[in-house]
C-alpha cells in the first residue's frame, strides 16, 4: 500500500524528524506493520507499508501517528474553527491518498517514486543526498546502487496519468 500523508506547513516534519520517528515506533509496537519504503519531506511524506495478513487497519495507525506527533509539538499553527470543534490541530491534511499495490512492477514503480520525490521537489540533485529516505537502507541492503536514478525522470515512477 502507498500512503501519502502530511502537513502543508513549512518544514515541520524534517525539523521534528525525531518526534515523527518516535511516533512511528510507538505505533509499530502496538499495531505491527513494516515500512517497505519511506521519504519524509519538509511538508509531506510518502510511505509503503506492509500490514499483517488479514489486517487492513491503516487508518488507525495513521491516526495514532498523527496524534502522537501533534501532541509532542507546541500549538503554534493556525487552527480553523471546524478543526478546533473536532479537536484537530492545523498540522495534518485531513485526507490522504492510498493505493493497494497490484504486483511487483507496481511496487517497484511506487518505491522508485518515493525515493525520487526529494529530487522531484528540488530539494536535492540526487536521491541519495536526501537524509530522510529509505533509499539509504535499500542501498545498504544491496537492493539499489548508490547512483540509482541518475538518469531517470519523475515521469517514470508512480501512478500513470491516464
Image (cartoon, rainbow, N blue to C red):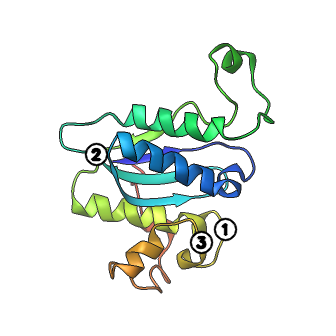
Q: Position of residue 132 (x, y in %)?
A: 57, 65
Q: CA distance from mark 2 to mark 3?
A: 26 Å
Between disc 1 and disc 3, the foreground one is 3
Between disc 1 and disc 2, the foreground one is 2
Residue sitting at 41 percent across and 80 percent down?
139
Residue at numbered disc 1 = 122
Mark 1 touches mark 3? (CB < 8 Å): no
Q: Position of residue 141 (x, y in %)?
A: 34, 78
Q: Position of residue 7 (x, y in %)?
A: 64, 42
Q: CA distance from mark 1 to mark 3?
A: 11 Å
Which image quadrant is residue 110 in?
A: bottom left
Q: Position of residue 29 (x, y in %)?
A: 38, 45
Q: Badge 3 local density, few (<14 within 10 Å), some, or many (20+)?
A: many
Mark 2 touches mark 3? (CB < 8 Å): no
Q: Which residue occupies the foreground of this view, 50 or 111?
A: 50
Residue sitting at 42 percent across and 73 percent down?
137
* Marker disc for residue 51: 2
Q: Is residue 127 toward the left or the right of residue 42 in the image? A: left
* Marker disc for residue 130: 3
Residue sitting at 79 percent across and 30 percent down?
78
Q: Secondary structure at mark 3?
A: loop
Q: Which residue occupies the foreground of this view, 99 or 139?
A: 139
Up/down of 45 relative to 109, above or below: above
Pick whichever of labels 1 and 3 is earlier in the sequence: 1
Amino acid at each position: 500500500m502507498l500512503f501519502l500523508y502530511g502537513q502543508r506547513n513549512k518544514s515541520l516534519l524534517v525539523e521534528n524528524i525525531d518526534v515523527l520517528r518516535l511516533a512511528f515506533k510507538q505505533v509499530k509496537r502496538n499495531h505491527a506493520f513494516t515500512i517497505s519504503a519511506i521519504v519524509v519531506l519538509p511538508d509531506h511524506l510518502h510511505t509503503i507499508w506492509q500490514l499483517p495478513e488479514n489486517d487492513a487497519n491503516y487508518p488507525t495507525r495513521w491516526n495514532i501517528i498523527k496524534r502522537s506527533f501533534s501532541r509532542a509539538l507546541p500549538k503554534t499553527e493556525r487552527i480553523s474553527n471546524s478543526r478546533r470543534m473536532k479537536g484537530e490541530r492545523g498540522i495534518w491534511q485531513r485526507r490522504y491518498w492510498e493505493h493497494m499495490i497490484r504486483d511487483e512492477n507496481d511496487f517497484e514503480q511506487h518505491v522508485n517514486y518515493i525515493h525520487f520525490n526529494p529530487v522531484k521537489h528540488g530539494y536535492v540533485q540526487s536521491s541519495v543526498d536526501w537524509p530522510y529516505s529509505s533509499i539509504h537502507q535499500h542501498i545498504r541492503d544491496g537492493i539499489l546502487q548508490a547512483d540509482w536514478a541518475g538518469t531517470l525522470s519523475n515521469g517514470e515512477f508512480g501512478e500513470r496519468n491516464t
